[in-house]
Every structure is written in structure tokens, then in C-alpha cells.
Image: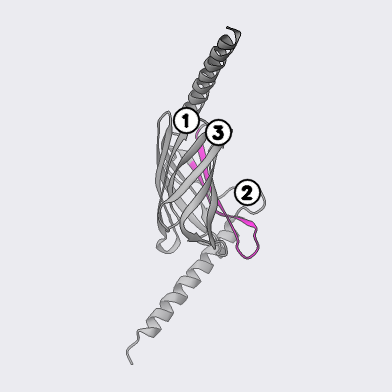
Amino acid sequence: MMKRVTATFLLVAMHSYAAVLHAAEAEFLKSMNGSWNGSGAVKIRVNYLPMNIACKFTSNATDTSLILEGKCTGFIGFSRTISADIRTNGSTYSGSYVGAGTGIAGLNGKRSGNAIKLAIRWAKEVNGDRSASMTIEKVGSDGMRLTTVDTDPRTGKSVVTSQINLRRGSSSPLHSLPEPERRGCFATGPRLRARNDAYQMARALTRVSRYEASHEPH
């Protein structure tokens, strides 16, 4: 009799815990609903200089899922569609991500506080392998930060390859990145942005000049 009562108690406790966990995840996900605007920086590859970008996103959340869809634009016609479709099953998250230009990547991870921390499995090799990480972080009541980190195959060090700071309902992009919050994040500031943009412009102009030279009539 005692064993039966204990088993019943444990079963009720497990169901109660699952209900509380589900409610907590549902509240967190739904708090990220809305339209978002912002800016940040991206590295096409770990050894490239960061490029400043402006982004717009929409998010659609339910009790068990979060769908992010957006577009980021940058220097010299850079444009990239970004989307993430993640679903929760208790304490774990899984789903898909598009944004690196290599096809649909797989996502798998957990939430820690205000951040969903996900491992990325690229469809093809990126920066020498198919592994990276992504964090979707809620910042305050109306902010969200998307960060991807990859490994430099030459040094083995982690490199922030993109960071986008978004504001719900903001009609204009935020400034680029704030002061780096940890070592390895992109450095910013007017002088560095100007230097990066000039560098990207010089590379683009060099490619155009080479193309025109190779197609001149002889």
C-alpha cells in the first residue's frame, strides 16, 4: 500500500513539475513576439573583417515554438535572409536555422535564464567544420540579441562571427554594436567602422577593376 501511495505521489509531482516547466517556457517564448529592428556586425568567415549591417525581424511565438524571420543588409549590396525555427520539448530546444548561405542547419540546445543556447550543425562545412553555436538572448523587456560563434581553424579560438542587437518596434536601426561585452567580440566605433567600410570598398573596387581588365577588348 505504501509503495502504491509513493508511486502515485511521485507521478503527481512529475506532472506538476512538467506543467510548471511548460508554463515557464511558454511565458518566455511569448515574451519574444513582435517586430524587431536593429543593427550589428557580421563576419562572412572567421578571418574576414566585420561588416556593419542593419536588420529587420519578425517573430511568431506559441507555447512551444519560436519562429524568427528577417533580413540584414550591409555594405556594397550585401543582403542576407535569416530565419530560425525552434521548438521546445520540456527543457530542450531543437529546430533549424538559415543564414550562413550553406543551406538549412540543425539546432539543438537549452535555455539558460534569458538566453536560448544552441549548438549549430551546418549543412556544409563553414570555417573548416560543421559546428558552431548560437545564442538567442532576451535583453530587458524589449530587446533581443542574436549571436553566433565559430572556431578559427588556424588558432582553435572562438570567434564571434555575428552579433545583431534588436529592439522591438524600433523604427530605425540601433547603432552598431555596443562596447564589447567580452573578449573576442567585435570592436566598434566611428573610426573602426570607417576603416572596415573603406577596406571592404577597396576589396570590391579591386575585384571590379580586375574583372574589367580581363574583359577589355584586345
Is the stretch drawn in magenta largely helix, strand or loop? Answer: strand
The image quadrant of residue 204 is: bottom left
Q: Position of residue 215 (x, y in %)?
A: 35, 84
Residue that lies at the very extreme toward the left in this rendered image: 217
Mark 3 sits on what residue?
140
**Quarter of the image where the N terminus is located:** top right
Asked whether 156 falls inside the magenta stretch, the response is yes
On residue 179, the disc is: 2
Helix or strand or loop: what does disc 1 sit on? loop
Q: Position of residue 83 (x, y in %)?
A: 41, 47
Q: Is residue 49 above or below residue 217?
A: above
What is the span of residues highlighted in magenta in the rendered image?
142-166
Residue that lies at the very extreme toward the bottom in this rendered image: 218
Residue 137 visible in the current orientation? no
Amino acid beneath label 2: Glu
Residue 190 visible in the current orientation? yes
Helix or strand or loop: what does disc 2 sit on? loop
Q: Position of residue 103 (x, y in %)?
A: 40, 55
Amino acid beneath label 1: Ser
Q: Position of residue 160 (x, y in %)?
A: 58, 54
Amino acid beneath label 3: Gly
Asked whether 60 falls inside the magenta stretch, the response is no
